[in-house]
Structure formats: C-alpha cells, structure tokens
Amino acid sequence: MARLRRLNAIAATAFVLGGALFAAGAAFALFGSGDATTSAAIYFAGGLCFNTGGYVSLLQVVNAPRHVPGGEGGLVTRRWRWWSYEPLRVDWLAAFVLFAGTLVFGVDLLDSFLQGLSVQQVNRLIWAPDVIGCVLFLISGHLGFVEICHGRPRVLARELGWWIVAVNQLGSVLFMVSAIAAFTKPSTGSLVNADIANWGTVTGALCFSAGGVLQYFERP
C-alpha cells in the first residue's frame, strides 16, 4: 500500500503541474508576446506531466488490491506489474483511455512546433489530435463516473473520489470547448474564436490542477 500511496502522490503532482503549465501556456498566448514557439514549449512540458500522470494512474489500477473470486471478500495484492490488459474492468478502461488521451495530445503538442503549415495541415496535424484527445478524456471521465457510481448516474457529494472525477470531467468539457474554438477556418485562415480557445484551455487546465490537489487527499 505504501507504493500505491507514492504512486498516488506522483500522479497528483503530475496533474497539478501539467494543469498549471497548460494554463500558463494559454495565458502566455493571451497576455504575452504571442510567440508561438514559447507557448508550444510550455504546453509540451505540461503534456509530459500529463503523460506521467496518465501512466502512473494506470499503474495504480493495475496494481491495486482486488477481490479473489470465490474468496471471503478480502482484498489481496498481487506481484507488481508495469502493464496489464484488462478491458473488462471499468477502472482499467478509464485509466487506459485517459493515458491514451495524453499520448494523442502529445502528437498535437509535437506538431505545434512545425512551421509554415497550410490551413489544412494545421487542422489535420494539430487540431484533429487535439479533438481526439479531448474525446478520449471525456470517455475516460464518463467511465470514471460509471465506476465510482456503480453504473447509476448520481451525485455523491460526500465521496472525494466523485469530486475528483467531476472536477476533471469539467476540465475535459472545457478542453473540448477550447478545441472546437481552435479550428482554423479554411476561408479566412483564422481560428473560430481564439479567446474562447485560450480561456477554455486556461479554465480547463486549472480544473485538472484542482483535481490533482484533491487527489492528494485520496487514500488509494
């Protein structure tokens, strides 16, 4: 359990830092010099933090104590694993989809360093992975609700785990709003709405930071 508590602290720290860096990158785009490379570098650093948080979250699920079929209801801890494939477990699916989303975001963040792209290339190489990553985050959040609410939609105001999922899901919704607003219109070469895109990123990223702070207090 001590190792799982350390993993929880690492994941929480990664999400706090990742959210803070994403918010800083968007704030720089809003209020800074407007240098795209600097913003991209800040976003990329935040993306690495999200990658770390996503994988460590998956490790937590893979190595969590579990019930033994036919047992007396007790929990057992198996040998340590760095990976598993358990698609029939909702908690595993939620963590795996989240990790996959962070990797897809990484494609978007790497491509954002490219220079001289056409509008079509921007939408294909940067915008499309951004939207796909947002969709994966939303799916992960939905699965998180299914797991913590045992399949019944409800508010569990006294459950810290529910609040962590809810705050992160709000962040995912705001990221999706940002992504939609960041589509580059072929007719003009401008974004649908740059302010909404940046503010959606700022507020969504702060939600993930807040979720990370809450996660510090969760007992694995």
Image: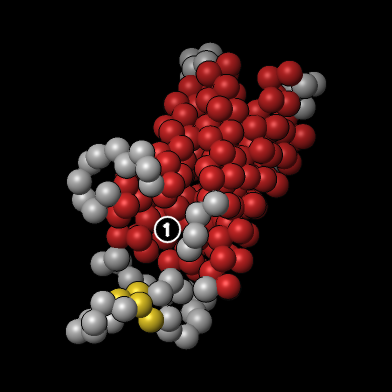
- The image shows residue 137, relative to residue 59, as above or below, that is above
Give the tally of numbered discs.
1
Q: Which is more toward the observer, 20 or 124?
A: 20
User: Who's the residue at 50% across and 54% down the image?
Assistant: 218
User: Who's the residue at 68% across and 39% down the image?
Assistant: 21
User: Who's the residue at 63% across and 45% down the image?
Assistant: 16
- What is the x, y in percent for residue 155? 29, 38
In the displayed structure image, the side of residue 3 where residue 176 appears, left or right: left
- What is the x, y in percent for residue 153? 23, 41
Question: Within 10 angstroms of label 1, few (less than 14), some, or many (20 or more) residues?
Answer: many
User: Who's the residue at 21% across and 50% down the image?
Assistant: 151
Q: Which is more toward the observer, 182 or 150?
A: 150
- The image shows residue 199, relative to residue 123, as above or below, that is above
- What is the x, y in percent for residue 99? 48, 56
- What is the x, y in percent for residue 140? 38, 49
What residue is disc 1 on? Answer: 95
